[in-house]
Amino acid sequence: MKKIVIVGGVAGGASAAARIRRLDEQAQIVMFEKGPHVSFSNCSLPFYLSGVVADSKRLVMMNPNSFEAKYNIDARVNSEVIAINRSEKTVTVKDVHTGEQFTESYDQLVLSPGASPIVPNIEGADLAHVFTVRNVVDIERLHNAIVEQDAQSIAVIGGGFIGVEVAENLRLAGRNVTLVQSAAQILTPFDEDMVQILHKEMVDHGVELITGDGLAEITTESITLKSGKQVAADLVVLAVGVRPETKLAVEAGLEIGETGAIAVNQNYQTSDHNIYAVGDAIEVYHRLMNKKTRLALAGPAQKQARAIADHIYGIPNQNRGVIGSSSIQVFDLAAASTGLNERSAKQLGIPTEAVYVIAPDKVGLMPSSNPLHFKLIYEVPTGRILGAQAIGKGNADKRVDVIATLISMNGTVEDLKDLELTYSPMFSTAKDVANMAALVASNLMAGRFKQVRVNEVRGLVEAGAYILDVREVNEFANGALKGAINIPLGEVRTRMSEIPKDKPVYVHCRSAQRSYNAVMALENSGYDKVYNISGSFLGISLYEYFTDQQQGREPIVTAYNFK
């Protein structure tokens, strides 16, 4: 009879325990958790702040009695493993309430300690009104403090997934929220041209969003940023990142990897092959970056947990590495990403191109049809798909999941172009946005047309470039690029003599589809310096809006138009 001890529950430890039980009814499984909850939905924690999750008890998925009754697993809470005694194959455990210590033997040990929130070394970080969010106890403490103090102004520090979700849910709860991000943008899996859509969404919903400015000091009533700006704050939530919990592993002499997380092999064994590790505490192999990385996501942790259980029982596991797929709701928008963003791909030296298309998420006749912004990143000249990002009110995650599947199979834009996807007017369009992006990419790779990006348009406007707007006259009147010439698509062929051949012509419409047709008409009529503006006027408006508002700079449009 095997005896398997697991340190830590939640996605990694609890999943490993359940899989081990399914494989071996006779195994003795002991799971230690230093907190009061061994299994909870940590990804759902922020939603308790807004009442989307009405009762914090619902965040707890299973308790020790449930583990015992349903799985015959000995789950012990408030039990902190403080040492691993490798030579004796035992762990030392401390009761967090009484301080009593005891040892527990193991045949195999699984480490699932997770990661802890980073607390910056600044003045005031240890004040009583400063919080972090890691578990149910944390979110209850924060919620209770807000209610008891009737806190109206709350500063959230950090623009990652937790910071954004906490800020959103606090705002939904009616609080005044300031989100501070030291980097130039929130949610770094998204490229700059895409994340501006989410910046605008947060601002539109009343969040004061400050980017490019870090936290310098916390006082009882405010925070001070590195720029000197002061922000009123009754409470402060620190969400600046996490670091892997490696103390146990380090003290036990286990190898720590280049990323600072626990090093594991393809079977998630540590340098001691009787000890496995899983989840946020380990480093993993990124199959696109071709290097080790850290990935604090529940989905990969559960897959790792299953692989550990299988390996213990001799079941082969194919470790494909990770690509980093994630999704998030930001007020009314769904946002998803997978693989590499364009920025990362270029930093890695991969010859990269990208397309940005805006298409309806379902047939335009449907009352719930909305624009879906989709970016596809691919390698040149192979067309190998490297990543994708999607943002919209519709099913952004569905489109990105398609790309994640193709990446896992080394798919190319040619594979995506011809991929047969489901269609109904209520769910998508006959030519889905993912297919459309691949068609644009294949045309670019074949040299059938040329493009410029939304981030290049300001420079073109300021340089006095010839910009052709092929939208209808009424669309142009509602907002246009300064200096642009309006010739509707239906008039381009009859007014072609007005368009110069001796200098570059940059064409746009609302979403780059009509402008693409104009570009091809011009190219087929002898124009050789014609460029389609990717994202077109809608993309330009979204890209420019937040930065214009934050920096107070002169807009390059007569009026933004987000319809």
Image (cartoon, grey):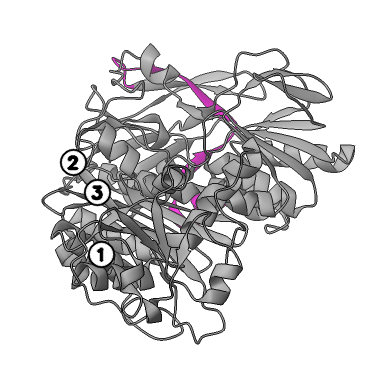
Task: Please report contact status of discs 2 and 3: CB closer than 8 Å, yes or no.
Answer: yes
Crowd tier of the residue under label 1, counting other residues whose Cα lies within 10 Å: few below 14, some 14–19, many 20 or above: many
- State the image coordinates of residue 366 (x, y, percent, origin top left): 51, 85
**Is 196 on the left-hand or right-hand side of 353?**
right
Q: Which amino acid is tagged 1?
A: Val
Q: Residue at x 71, y 38 (%)?
A: 178
As helix, strand or loop, the secondary structure at mark 2 comes to: loop
Q: Check whether the beta carbons of the residues at disc 2 and disc 1 lie within 8 A of each other.
A: no
Q: Amino acid at mark 2?
A: Pro
Residue at 35% x, 14% y is 252
Q: Which residue is mark 2?
A: 351
Residue linked to disc 1: 440
Query: Alpha-carbon neighbours of circle 3 within 10 Å: few (<14), some, or many (≥20)?
Result: many
- Give 380 or 250, whichever is nearer the viewer: 380
Q: Residue at x 19, y 35 (%)?
A: 290
For the residue pair 155 and 20, the one nearer the viewer reads as: 155
Magenta residues?
A: 66-89
> Secondary structure beneath disc 1?
helix
Is 508 in front, or is 247?
508
Residue 216 rendering spot, x and y as whole percentages: 66, 17
Residue at image mark 3: 353
561 relative position to 242: left or right: right
